[in-house]
Image (spheres, rainbow, N blue to C red):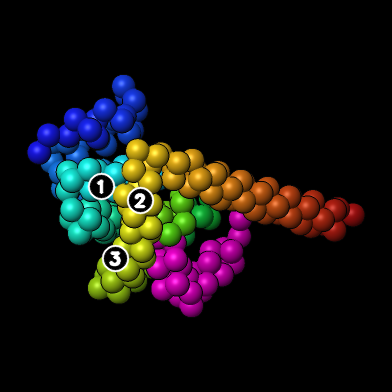
Amino acid sequence: MHLTPLAAQQPADGPARWAADLIDTLGGPGAGLAIALENLFPPLPSEVILPLTGFAAAQGVLSLASALFWTTLGSVVGAVTLYWVGMLFGRERMRAIWAKLPLVKSSDLERTEKWFAEHGTKAVFLGRMVPVFRSLISVPAGVERMPLPLFVTLTTLGSLIWNAVLILAGYWLGDQWDVVGRYVGFLSKAVLILIALALAVYVTVRLRDRNRTRDQRTP
Protein backbone atom coordinates (compact mmCIF):
# COMPACT_ATOMS: atom_id res chain seq x y z
CA MET A 1 0.00 0.00 0.00
CA HIS A 2 1.30 3.42 -0.92
CA LEU A 3 2.43 5.47 2.06
CA THR A 4 2.61 8.96 0.57
CA PRO A 5 0.34 10.55 3.21
CA LEU A 6 2.46 9.04 6.00
CA ALA A 7 5.85 9.74 4.43
CA ALA A 8 4.84 13.31 3.66
CA GLN A 9 4.52 14.01 7.39
CA GLN A 10 8.09 12.95 8.21
CA PRO A 11 11.36 14.89 8.32
CA ALA A 12 14.00 14.25 5.68
CA ASP A 13 15.97 12.03 8.04
CA GLY A 14 16.07 10.80 11.62
CA PRO A 15 14.21 8.02 13.47
CA ALA A 16 10.79 9.15 12.24
CA ARG A 17 11.80 8.92 8.59
CA TRP A 18 13.53 5.60 9.20
CA ALA A 19 10.46 4.16 10.92
CA ALA A 20 8.17 5.56 8.22
CA ASP A 21 10.25 3.86 5.54
CA LEU A 22 10.07 0.54 7.41
CA ILE A 23 6.29 0.78 7.75
CA ASP A 24 6.04 1.92 4.13
CA THR A 25 7.98 -1.13 2.97
CA LEU A 26 6.80 -3.85 5.37
CA GLY A 27 3.59 -2.57 6.97
CA GLY A 28 2.88 -4.08 10.40
CA PRO A 29 6.00 -6.29 10.43
CA GLY A 30 8.06 -3.16 9.74
CA ALA A 31 6.63 -1.50 12.85
CA GLY A 32 7.37 -4.67 14.82
CA LEU A 33 10.95 -4.74 13.56
CA ALA A 34 11.43 -1.10 14.52
CA ILE A 35 10.19 -1.78 18.07
CA ALA A 36 12.36 -4.91 18.40
CA LEU A 37 15.40 -2.82 17.48
CA GLU A 38 14.24 -0.08 19.88
CA ASN A 39 14.38 -2.63 22.71
CA LEU A 40 17.94 -3.61 21.78
CA PHE A 41 19.11 -0.05 21.14
CA PRO A 42 17.24 2.26 23.57
CA PRO A 43 18.35 5.47 21.79
CA LEU A 44 15.79 4.52 19.13
CA PRO A 45 12.68 6.20 20.57
CA SER A 46 9.50 4.17 21.02
CA GLU A 47 7.78 7.50 21.69
CA VAL A 48 8.34 8.28 18.00
CA ILE A 49 7.81 4.84 16.48
CA LEU A 50 4.57 3.93 18.27
CA PRO A 51 2.59 7.16 17.72
CA LEU A 52 3.79 7.15 14.11
CA THR A 53 2.43 3.61 13.78
CA GLY A 54 -0.89 4.84 15.19
CA PHE A 55 -0.94 7.65 12.64
CA ALA A 56 -0.25 5.11 9.91
CA ALA A 57 -3.26 3.09 11.13
CA ALA A 58 -5.40 6.23 11.01
CA GLN A 59 -4.30 6.71 7.40
CA GLY A 60 -5.38 3.16 6.54
CA VAL A 61 -1.84 1.91 5.97
CA LEU A 62 -2.48 -0.91 8.46
CA SER A 63 -5.19 -1.80 10.94
CA LEU A 64 -5.06 -0.98 14.64
CA ALA A 65 -5.12 -4.70 15.42
CA SER A 66 -2.12 -5.25 13.15
CA ALA A 67 -0.27 -2.31 14.71
CA LEU A 68 -0.83 -3.64 18.24
CA PHE A 69 0.02 -7.22 17.33
CA TRP A 70 3.26 -6.55 15.50
CA THR A 71 4.61 -3.90 17.84
CA THR A 72 3.89 -6.08 20.88
CA LEU A 73 5.53 -9.05 19.16
CA GLY A 74 8.54 -6.83 18.40
CA SER A 75 8.71 -5.76 22.06
CA VAL A 76 8.69 -9.38 23.21
CA VAL A 77 11.35 -10.45 20.68
CA GLY A 78 13.65 -7.60 21.70
CA ALA A 79 13.09 -8.24 25.41
CA VAL A 80 13.70 -11.99 25.12
CA THR A 81 16.93 -11.31 23.24
CA LEU A 82 18.16 -9.17 26.15
CA TYR A 83 16.89 -11.80 28.61
CA TRP A 84 19.11 -14.37 26.92
CA VAL A 85 22.04 -11.95 27.06
CA GLY A 86 21.57 -11.72 30.82
CA MET A 87 21.13 -15.47 31.11
CA LEU A 88 24.31 -16.20 29.13
CA PHE A 89 26.19 -13.57 31.08
CA GLY A 90 25.26 -15.36 34.27
CA ARG A 91 25.22 -14.63 37.96
CA GLU A 92 28.79 -15.80 38.64
CA ARG A 93 30.25 -13.53 35.98
CA MET A 94 28.14 -10.69 37.33
CA ARG A 95 29.51 -11.33 40.81
CA ALA A 96 33.08 -11.39 39.49
CA ILE A 97 32.65 -8.03 37.74
CA TRP A 98 30.80 -6.57 40.72
CA ALA A 99 33.69 -7.49 43.02
CA LYS A 100 36.06 -5.39 40.89
CA LEU A 101 33.89 -2.28 40.83
CA PRO A 102 34.87 0.62 43.09
CA LEU A 103 32.53 1.88 45.81
CA VAL A 104 30.36 -1.24 45.83
CA LYS A 105 30.07 -4.13 48.26
CA SER A 106 29.09 -7.73 47.73
CA SER A 107 26.22 -7.10 50.15
CA ASP A 108 24.81 -4.55 47.66
CA LEU A 109 24.54 -7.22 44.99
CA GLU A 110 23.02 -9.66 47.47
CA ARG A 111 20.38 -7.11 48.44
CA THR A 112 19.68 -6.43 44.76
CA GLU A 113 19.25 -10.14 44.06
CA LYS A 114 16.98 -10.51 47.09
CA TRP A 115 14.91 -7.52 45.98
CA PHE A 116 14.52 -8.94 42.48
CA ALA A 117 13.53 -12.32 43.87
CA GLU A 118 10.76 -10.63 45.87
CA HIS A 119 9.65 -7.96 43.39
CA GLY A 120 10.91 -9.17 40.00
CA THR A 121 7.46 -9.89 38.58
CA LYS A 122 6.26 -6.36 39.31
CA ALA A 123 9.54 -4.90 38.05
CA VAL A 124 9.31 -6.70 34.71
CA PHE A 125 5.62 -5.89 34.20
CA LEU A 126 5.74 -2.23 35.26
CA GLY A 127 9.21 -1.71 33.81
CA ARG A 128 7.81 -2.26 30.32
CA MET A 129 5.91 1.00 30.78
CA VAL A 130 8.85 3.09 32.01
CA PRO A 131 11.20 4.73 29.50
CA VAL A 132 14.82 3.53 29.72
CA PHE A 133 13.89 0.65 32.08
CA ARG A 134 11.88 -0.90 29.24
CA SER A 135 15.08 -2.37 27.87
CA LEU A 136 17.23 -2.58 31.00
CA ILE A 137 14.86 -4.71 33.06
CA SER A 138 15.22 -7.68 30.71
CA VAL A 139 18.90 -8.22 31.54
CA PRO A 140 18.58 -8.78 35.32
CA ALA A 141 15.56 -10.99 34.63
CA GLY A 142 17.87 -13.19 32.56
CA VAL A 143 20.70 -13.03 35.09
CA GLU A 144 18.31 -14.12 37.85
CA ARG A 145 16.84 -16.76 35.52
CA MET A 146 13.22 -15.74 35.92
CA PRO A 147 11.15 -18.55 34.35
CA LEU A 148 10.95 -17.74 30.65
CA PRO A 149 7.18 -18.34 30.30
CA LEU A 150 6.54 -15.95 33.20
CA PHE A 151 8.93 -13.37 31.73
CA VAL A 152 7.27 -13.58 28.31
CA THR A 153 3.78 -13.28 29.82
CA LEU A 154 4.67 -10.23 31.94
CA THR A 155 6.56 -8.62 29.05
CA THR A 156 3.65 -9.20 26.66
CA LEU A 157 1.08 -7.67 29.02
CA GLY A 158 3.23 -4.69 29.98
CA SER A 159 4.27 -4.03 26.39
CA LEU A 160 0.70 -4.31 25.13
CA ILE A 161 -0.43 -1.61 27.55
CA TRP A 162 2.47 0.73 26.72
CA ASN A 163 2.17 0.17 22.99
CA ALA A 164 -1.62 0.57 23.01
CA VAL A 165 -1.46 3.91 24.83
CA LEU A 166 1.06 5.42 22.43
CA ILE A 167 -0.41 3.89 19.27
CA LEU A 168 -3.93 5.04 20.14
CA ALA A 169 -2.60 8.50 20.98
CA GLY A 170 -1.03 8.70 17.53
CA TYR A 171 -4.19 7.33 15.95
CA TRP A 172 -6.41 9.96 17.61
CA LEU A 173 -4.02 12.88 17.18
CA GLY A 174 -3.58 12.28 13.46
CA ASP A 175 -0.96 14.53 11.89
CA GLN A 176 -0.20 15.90 15.37
CA TRP A 177 1.10 12.48 16.47
CA ASP A 178 4.56 13.90 17.22
CA VAL A 179 3.12 15.72 20.25
CA VAL A 180 3.18 12.35 22.04
CA GLY A 181 6.92 12.08 21.55
CA ARG A 182 7.55 15.44 23.20
CA TYR A 183 5.62 14.53 26.35
CA VAL A 184 7.09 11.03 26.64
CA GLY A 185 10.51 12.55 25.95
CA PHE A 186 10.07 14.73 29.04
CA LEU A 187 9.27 11.58 31.04
CA SER A 188 12.39 9.85 29.70
CA LYS A 189 14.55 12.79 30.72
CA ALA A 190 12.97 12.82 34.17
CA VAL A 191 13.78 9.12 34.60
CA LEU A 192 17.39 9.71 33.55
CA ILE A 193 17.70 12.63 35.97
CA LEU A 194 16.35 10.49 38.82
CA ILE A 195 18.85 7.75 37.96
CA ALA A 196 21.69 10.27 37.93
CA LEU A 197 20.59 11.68 41.30
CA ALA A 198 20.34 8.20 42.79
CA LEU A 199 23.85 7.38 41.57
CA ALA A 200 25.19 10.65 42.96
CA VAL A 201 23.65 9.91 46.38
CA TYR A 202 25.00 6.35 46.29
CA VAL A 203 28.54 7.48 45.45
CA THR A 204 28.44 10.23 48.11
CA VAL A 205 27.34 7.77 50.80
CA ARG A 206 29.96 5.21 49.77
CA LEU A 207 32.76 7.79 49.78
CA ARG A 208 31.67 9.07 53.19
CA ASP A 209 31.62 5.52 54.60
CA ARG A 210 35.03 4.77 53.11
CA ASN A 211 36.56 7.92 54.60
CA ARG A 212 34.96 7.19 57.98
CA THR A 213 36.36 3.66 57.97
CA ARG A 214 39.82 4.93 57.02
CA ASP A 215 39.74 7.53 59.79
CA GLN A 216 38.79 4.88 62.34
CA ARG A 217 41.72 2.70 61.31
CA THR A 218 44.20 5.57 61.42
CA PRO A 219 45.90 5.66 64.89
Please name the amino acid that badge 2 sits on.
Answer: Trp
Crowd band around label 1 with a 10 angstrom C-alpha radius: few (<14), some (14–19), many (20+): many
Q: For mark 2, what is the residue?
A: 172
Residue 141 lies in the magenta-colored region = no
Secondary structure type for disc 3: helix
Which residues fall within the magenta stretch?
Answer: 103-128
Q: For mark 3, what is the residue?
A: 156
Quarter residue 70 falls in: bottom left
The answer to whether marks 2 and 1 mark residues whose Cβ atoms lie closer than 8 Å is yes
Residue at left offset 82%, top offset 56%: 212
Crowd band around label 3 with a 10 angstrom C-alpha radius: few (<14), some (14–19), many (20+): many
Up the image or down, 138 lies above or below 27; here it is: below
Measure the C-alpha gap from mark 3 to mark 2: 23 Å
Residue 34 placed where, x, y %?
A: 25, 43
Please name the amino acid that badge 1 sits on.
Answer: Ala
Please name the amino acid that badge 3 sits on.
Answer: Thr
On residue 8, which mark appears? Answer: none
Residue 117 lies in the magenta-colored region = yes
Measure the C-alpha gap from mark 1 to mark 3: 24 Å
Q: Which of marks 3 and 2 is in front?
A: 2
Residue 155 placed where, x, y %?
A: 32, 65
Which numbered disc, 2 or 1, marks the residue that appears first in the sequence? 1
Residue at left offset 61%, top offset 60%: 105
Residue 9 placed where, x, y %?
A: 31, 30
Which quadrant is the N terminus positioned in? top left
Q: For mark 1, what is the residue?
A: 58
Residue that lies at the very extreme toward the right in this rendered image: 219
Q: Nearer the viewer, mark 1 or mark 3?
A: 1
